[in-house]
Every structure is written in structure tokens, then in C-alpha cells.
Amino acid sequence: MTSTVPTQVAIVGAGPAGLVLSHLLAESGIDSIIIDQRSRDEIENTIRAGILEQGTVDLLARLPGSRAHTVGMRHDGIELRFDEAGHRIDFPGLTGRSVWLYPQHEALKDLIAARLEAGQDLRFGVTAMAVEDGGTTRPRVVAEHSGGTTLEIEADFVVGADGSHSVVRREISGSHDGLFREYPFAWFGILCEAAPSAPELIYSNSPHGFALISQRSPDVQRMYFQCDPETDPTAMTEDQIWDILQQRVPGVTLVEGPIFQRDVLRFRSFVARELRHGRLTIVGDAAHTVPPTGAKGMNLAVADVILLARALEALLTRSDSTLIDGWADAARDRIWKAQHFSWWMTSMLHTTPDASDFDRERQLGELRSVVESEAGRAYLAEGYTGWPLG
Ligand code: PHB
């Protein structure tokens, strides 16, 4: 059985990019349908990074039902640690902006609830199989319900916000056609029941490798340490994990507590070669991935769709294609700044397995030149808090 539904914009993927886009389109009176192969429960409970740039939080906060400013916590700085000393980067003092710690799955709960409350079409458990008629003015998404029935969405425009294994990317850029870089390390991440170990996030470069002391709430903390990508997250005892973390933040005493989740996050930098083909585009992780250092992933996804919402408003309500024709270049401008920033933070803070004494001393020289100069600190703070959205 096949059912066909018409809409203006078919959005594949109910992550931050897809959901924010649908809200922005609705503000301009444009209809959309979102499908996602996952269940609502899975989307709302998958733990991802939690740092929102000022521009991202300002946008989320003005959407209905957002708790970004009430449950989220403003962070006015981070600490960079190396050579057993901490150096604060003061964001408002350097840029006039801050960041907010608001876990992505909490933001997703707000966005999903607001969409459903407004009576908009959001379908879980529906898997996109293909996009057809991509080169025409009426492309179609062919999808399958978990029960096996087929759904066709006929739209004026199709947006792939369907993550790093994007089905829509296949139609635009080929599954693997992009510019990418792999890294010889990953992050071992934990969630634990404990009070924060420090008022702000700590990014630590130690002779034993990188560690990040992040937070989630007053009684749950998120911490990471650099590890081999092949590490088995179940193979270590809690004591071993705490020993590694403590060793990597010399001079700081971590508040320890029961570890209730652990995972290994692999690193990859990727940008698809093509972001748009006619009336198809890809956004967010479907278009690019960044290593997690600096927490740019969700922020970049939101920046993509802010630009796209403007372009679709012009195209679909005024038949003006100027912005959509320039959209990929405009998006790419920020994507490559964020790629550079994420790569730079990663390379400055992590140890590569084959690092020589020269490499180590050069890295410490780089860190000193960042923290000891106002220009260096401002450069980091600008990238971390996010470049203006224009
Ligand atoms: C996180 O809390 O998960 C987090 C924070 C900052 C990062 C990356 C991840 O740079």
C-alpha cells in the first residue's frame, strides 16, 4: 500500500537541523513534513554535545516552549590547561558573547513538543528510501513505515537533514563524495552522577593526552579523554577510568561518582562536495561532520538552516531564486570556518600516537601564544562563541 502526501518542503530527519528548519518555515507560512526513521523516544534520549553558541541559543529561545534560557546554563568562559596551570578564556570580555550549556536532547524535546503542539506533521519510524524526480520542480521522497507500507511525499523542495549516513546526500553528492580527514584518536566519554568539578569546562592538554571536563546539570557530569579509536568502552573498570581522567588534569581534583554511561566517539572531518542539486539540499551532519572539540556540530547545523529558511522563503513565496542559488556558497563559508576551528582546537590539544619531542614543545608554544596574547584569546573566543550569523 502506498499513500501520497503533498507538502511544500519535505524534510528527512528530525534532528536539530530538520526541526529548527520546520519551525522557521512555519514562521514564514511554509508547510513542511518531517520524517525520521527513529522513534521519538530514541531521538529524545540520545546523548549528544551540549554547548550552544550565542546565536543558536538566541534562536532556540524565541521558539515556542523553549527551556534553553531556563534549564540551560550560561557559560562565560572555558579553562585551557597545560603545563599544570589553567588559563581562563573570558568570552564576554573578548567578544561580548557567551555560550550556553543546554544538552542537545533537551533542545530536541522542546522542538518536537512545539511542533506537535502546533499541529504540524512530524512522523517517527518512517525511513526514507530514495528521492525521485530530484531534477524537477516537484521532487518526491519515497519512504517506508516501520509496518512496511510505503509513503510518498511530493514537495516543492526536499531537505536532507538525515545525519552522516544521509540517503538524500546519495542523490546530490554520492554517499562518499566529499573532502575529509580522519584522526588517529577518539574520545572515551562518560556520564557520571557527581557535582561539577569546576565552574566552567576544562580543556586539558597533558603529557598523557587530552581530557575535557564538561557538565550536564548540577548532579550529572560529562567527561572525555582521548583514546585509541579501537578501545572497547566496557573493558575498563571505573577506577581505571578515574585514574586516567585525574592524571590528565594535573592540579585539578575531580569530583568522582558512579559512571552510568560510557561510549567511544570516533573523529572525522567531512564536507560533502555538493550541498545542493536543483530542489534538493543537505544540511547538518548530512552535509558535514566536525570532530567534537569545540562543540560546533549542532551550531553549524542551525546556521545552515537559518540561511536555508531565508532562501526557501524567497523561492517559495516570491519565486525569487537568488538566495537559493547562492545558498551552498554562503553555507560553505561558515562550514569551512567551523571545520578549521574544530581541527585547530583538536590539533592543539590532542597528542598524536607518533608525536615527537619537537611536536610536543611546538604544541605548548602554540598554547602559550594563544593564552598569553589578547589577540590569541579573542581568536579562540570568537570561534567558540560563534561568528555572527549575518
Ligand atoms: C559535551 O559536553 O558533550 C561537550 C562539550 C564541549 C565540547 C564537546 C563536547 O567541545
Image (spheres, helix red, strand yellow):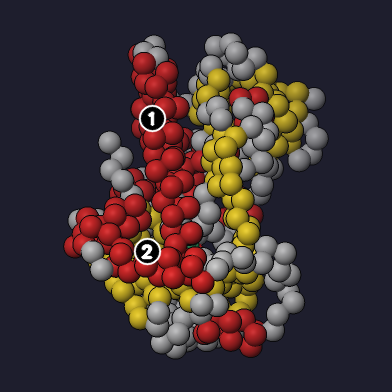
Point 40% across, 76% down: residue: 82
For residue 104, side relative to residue 201 (left or right): right
Q: Count how many numbered circles sit on residues in the image.
A: 2
Task: Determine which residue is flagged by label 1.
Answer: 330
Q: Residue at x 55, y 20 (%)?
A: 277
Farthest residue, direction front: 358
Quarter-wise, where is residue 7 in the image? top right
Give the residue type that dot 1 points to: Ala
- Residue 2 position by quadrant: top right
Say if 229 sits above or below 170 in the image. below
Q: Position of residue 312 (x, y in %)?
A: 42, 23
Q: Quadrant of residue 13?
A: top right
How far from the left and from the top, in percent, is residue 302?
Answer: 42, 42
Q: Which amino acid type is shown beneath numbered disc 2?
A: Glu
Q: Which residue is mark 2?
A: 366
> Which circle, 1 or 2, is nearer the viewer?
2
